[in-house]
Amino acid sequence: MTDLRPLEAELRGAVRGEVGFDTTSRALTTMDASNYRRVPLGVVAPRDADDVAAALAVCRAHGVPVVARGGGTSIAGQATGTGVVLDFTRHMNQLLSLNHEERTAVVQPGLVLDRLQDAAAPHGLRFGPDPSTHGRCTLGGMIGNNSCGSHSVAWGTTADNVRELSVIRARGDRLRPGQDWAGAPEGLRQLAEGELARLRTGFPDLPRRISGYALDALLPEKGADVARSFCGSEGTLGIVTEAVVRLVEAPRARALAVLAYGDESAAAEAAAGLLPYGPLTVEGMAADLVRATAGLPRGGAWLFVETGGADAAEARARADTIVRAADVTDALVVADPAGQRALWRIREDASGTATRMPDGTAAWPGWEDCAVPPPRLGAYLRDFRGLLRDHGLRGTPYGHFGDGCIHVRIDFDLLTAPGVARFRRFSEELADLVVAHGGSLSGEHGDGQARAELLPKMYAPEVIALFERTKALWDPDDLLNPGMLVRPARLDENLRFAVLPRKPVPVAFGYPADGGDFSAAVSRCVGVAKCRTPAVGMGKGGSDVMCPSFRVTGEEAHSTRGRARLLHEMLAGEVITDGWRSVEVRDALDLCLSCKGCRSDCPVEVDMATYKAEFLHHHWAGRLRPAAHYTMGRLPVWLRAVARTRTAGLVNSLASVRVLAAVAKRLGGIAPEREIPAVARETFSRWWGRRAAARDSGERRPAVVLWPDTFTEHLTPSVGQAAVRVLESAGLEVTLPPPARTGVCCGLTYVSTGQLDRARAVLRRTLDLMEPVLDAGTPVVVLEPSCAAALRADLPELLHDDPRARRLADAVLTFAETLEHHAPNWTPPHVNRPATGQTHCHQHAVLGDTADRRLREAAGLTGELTGGCCGLAGNFGFEKGHYEVSTACAEERLLPAVREAGEEAVVLADGFSCRTQLQQLAGVRGRHLAEVLAEGLEAGGK
């Protein structure tokens, strides 16, 4: 179809929801979490079942296929298509009712699983299946794939927990599939009753058989359950608009036994033997996927065995029983919920961690979730490892060992013809191996394009013919998700990597973890979609940050995944055709706060802040930039000019005149709602010079260099003064970098606005000035977290050709790290007050806050700081058009936490942006930890 205007016009006239045939809408839905890519014609976000029916009618009239899409986390390619995509996450995402007495809920297909769990929890209930993507996967997608999750040994698959469905077929009729042939399309009963022998003998009997259509659910002894047979049909039979699901009683208490084994085969062989003890989970993973600091018991592989009970003692006793029964090298039982969450995060993040080999090589899905009978899992894994060796491939198995289901990402070469050919040969041989062990090609994520072609290896020709007849009964026109399950596309077609440039594109950053290849960096995003989690969760050393703009807008384009998809399509050049000049990519990146949260919270460490800086560098090359790039992007220049001319008082006076401030903000691209921060009348360096001249210390102490960042130097010198007081009290000799007319600078404001040529020049000058410090090996203390992160991460990646960059990055320490490493015997003053506030985004993502936590604890500052993002994020919150999003980010966690804190609470905010946001939105003074400790020293007379 060359002219899409009639189709688009008819859809707009027929449905009340949004219709998107624009470049951005199409580019965002070309991929799911698989290796595959298809470009849709357009996207429809239906408001209700009537919209779904109307969209199907229009598409049927035009002969255009339809693909239903939920969270887009499918791993086999079944959430992509070349026709019209139905996006259920925007409107049809509600929990319609919950009956705790009958233990049922009525849900729409776009409802995220965690929202159902949150609603059921107060009644002591939950939905049994719980994939690791529970924070963003939808119930419709779970029904389409027959998803399972870690608790399937106790509560089964999605199909086991669906009572009734509301389905619209491609020809528009509405059915209510359920038991006893309820909702069966005409001819389905006759088909099944004519093939009873085949339905009884042609399907492997194992807990995780997801491949193909579940036609054996139509057997009379299984209740002739049409709804159950529909689950796992991957959107090929009908469109689900509503579902009645069963809920199960959640244990009042849980315990987690982590059992250690020598390797994953030993763990796999032990898993089936634990099932008689009634565990809630039997999950397995190997050491390849675990960071050394994970705190797991000693071993090469682990089983995560969860138990439940009426109280903590009963749950713990059941876990202890399993430990005694298991033949393990070591074990750990955790009963407290926080400890269990931390351990479960290790397992859940494996879906992302597995995408990288230990040496950084990318690994891909495609054979993500084969399943065999649990007693055969150990033998299967040994054969699987042998097959990997035969093909020169690597992969680390993990997954649902108690159900015989294995997840694995494999380092396929999907970029070259020989690599793709090996991918096909391996796939064919692995399918044979799975079938030889009595298994299923898919044990959780469905067949999609990745495995459907190989279903004839698992099922007899007569069963494959039954699948085709079933598809024809439900969808005679082959309108729904064609190419999946029946008459499938080849497994080596439509690979998403095929459209990327064959040679690395010229870029400014080094991308050392991706071999200097920007395409490889963008391809890090595999669609796991953790960035689409609507609520802040617990992360490394604190709460997650990623992705603040998505949590505010709910738009895919404002998620890390969405932006990565747009960059992928920009490099492909098919949907987005104007490359670095793309307005679509620019607009999506406009609301990226450059918080770097994705760098740590994304399981595959996508660094969208760096990608944004790279894009802006190319997008505005040779063109007039936005005004904010000249004002806030070059902030160090303007502030140094004010300092040299000693005009801070005049600048502050002018900024206090409302009319003049309004003009300045309009010309400077600054949000009119913002107040212009006051400039310090005396810079930190001038204060230091006066103080140093008056102070003569003959005492020789360990030396540290205090970095005079732009914010400390010109806007809040009190922070620097407080830091000097504390560091000297700890016995350290504080010095400043060698003086120069322009001074040292981390280049942060230039990087965040994509002025990378200027950033490089500034950073090279900084390295020249800092060379004596580097030669002396003196630690460099940086008080502003964003500047410390820029020096530690951006500097070596931007000046990857200068070895001094890495030396300076390695010399950088935070305030708390300095005290911990270089004054380990110092005792901080006892402040003994509750603390509230927020861990700085860049500290969370790049620097870590372990030392800060220990320092706060030693000082008697109690309480946890919040996660999320303050929303100001340097220049972001000051830029015109960003105020509402900036404020909404602050209102998510930071401002409520501050309001709820008592008057005695110390509001901690090490970042200038965080303190400014608190002052401007809440009238609250946030303080750097150095200021709080300095006040404690004064109060204690030290």
Image: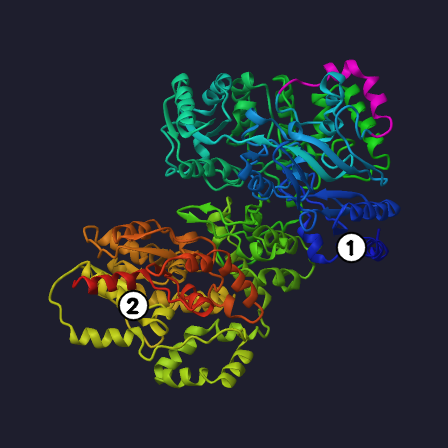
Q: Which residue is mark 2?
A: 720
604 with respect to 2 (left or right): left
Magenta span covers which residues?
Answer: 185-206
| Badge 1 amino acid | Arg
Q: Residue at x 66, y 31 (%)?
A: 146
Residues 108 and 87: in front is 108
642 with respect to 446 (left or right): left
In the image, is residue 672 above or below residue 748? below
Residue 66: give x, y in percent of width and height: 78, 43
Q: Can I make out residue 644 in this image?
A: yes
Residue pushed farthest left? Answer: 698
Residue 518: give x, y in percent of width and height: 55, 53
- Please report contact status of discs 1 and 2: CB closer than 8 Å, yes or no: no
Under circle 1, the secondary element is: loop
The mark that comes first in sequence, 1 or 2, is: 1
Q: Which residue is mark 1?
A: 16
